[in-house]
Image (cartoon, rainbow, N blue to C red):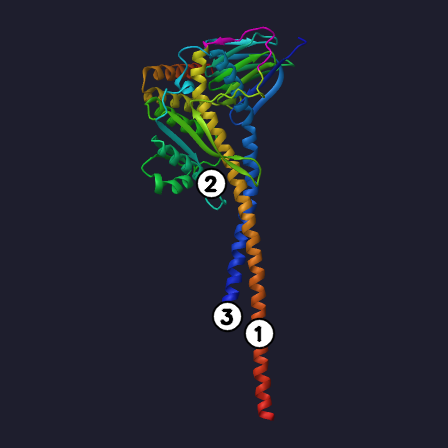
Amino acid sequence: MPNLKDLKNRITSVTSTQKITRAMQMVAAAKLRKAQESAEAARPFSERMAIVLANLSAAMEGREGASPLMAGTGKDQTHLLIVCTAERGLCGGFNSSIAKLARLKAIELAGQGKDVKMLCVGKKGFDALKREFGSKIIDVVDLKAVKKVGFADANGIASTVLDLFEDGGFDVCTLFYSEFKNVITQIPTAQQLIPATVEKSDDTEPLDLNGAIYEYEPEEDEILADLLPRNIAIQILRALLENGASEQGARMSAMDNATRNAGEMIDKLTLSYNRQRQAQITSELIEIISGAEALNG
Amino acid sequence: MAELLKFELVSPEKLLMSAEVEQVVVPGSEGDFGVFVNHAPVLSTMRPGIIDITEADGKKQRIFVRGGFAEVNPQGLTVLAEQAINMDDLDAAALAQEVANAEEDVADAKSDDKRQKAQETLDHLKQLQTSL
């Protein structure tokens, strides 16, 4: 049974923890708004990019000499997994759920006899994966110093990936990140980057060109060769921005929970503190009274 | 001119501009081209250069872009720029930095193909520098 002093110390310590988690929650909420804004601001570009790509690939369909970024290298022996996580912890299951998804994929691929390589963006993913896949992790991109993720950061990662691809370092590239749905829900997602999957979705309807034909300048294949590497950078940027918003969302709800738990704990501790104090007073009184009675009697 | 061209300038970070304008001159990789309303559909890559925009009220705006591509369709012109800076904000120092970066790219390029591309970029930037 802890004594009164212990209990008092516990209460103080939990109270200060609660202060910290509450502050973190508020910081996350403020950052979330910013991250969400920038994730949303980046959408028009990738949407338009997708439309242009779809148009182009439709025009290119059935032609020879498609870029390997689009058509693949013709095999799928070596897989590169780009795992995007956060640089900081204390955000609930955010990092571990992405790492878990990547881990499962890596195990599945290894089971099929494929080679797996990994590129970690963000320290936490690296920490989670290095024990099991340490020899397979080829690079770690540290974005700790980056306050606001921009196109330049994504482009840097993309050029690393593309260089590796050109050297025949891998055949298939998959990007792991967490899609931001709302503050409570973030969905860990795996997206295939190379070979590019062009969505022939219904929402990107072909444009009515009034019978005119697109003029390409330079030729289609040259544009496509220019566009595809750029598309990779854009996809990575999008993933990083989504991740940023997801991270803050996850941290916010995790810290909200922590604050609430701390509150409950304080209540419980205060209750037992008061009970014990009362019990102590009662027993002291009994001692005094029985002492007095012994004298009188 | 009655009809106006719907023009959108998008960078990876955000939608920079969406307006109805009179004319836009795009620095295409195979030469500048002007776009008015009802232009034939074109898809072109861009070199680093300056987009000249003539707004509906005749005001001019100049924006520096660092590569990207432009798409003209019946709905208007969409420019997807890798990086876009308003000419008023672009100073010689920033441009000098760009040139230095491009020079580094030329030096770092592994294949001839890449070197040539980097060299072209460098040339465009230098040209820009002299015109500033």
Which numbered disc covers residue A97?
A: 2
The kind of residue tagged 2 is Ser
On the same chain: label 3 and label 1? Answer: yes
Compared to residue A121, the image places residue A284 above or below, namely below
Q: Is mark 3 on a helix, strand or loop?
A: loop
| Magenta span: chief secondary structure | loop
Q: Residue at x 41, y 10 (%)?
A: A64
Q: Which chain carries label 2?
A: A
Identify the mark at residue A3; answer none if there is no mark: 3
Where disc 1 sits, the SS reads helix
Which residue lies at the image location 55% right of the left edge and 44% below the top edge? A252
**How many angstroms separate mark 3 from mark 2 (CA)?**
41 Å
The answer to whether dots 2 and 1 both sit on one chain is yes
Residue picked out by circle 1: A279
Is residue A103 in view from this perspective?
yes
Choose top left, top right, bottom left or bottom right for residue A166.
top left
Query: Which span of residues is magenta-colored?
Result: A206-219
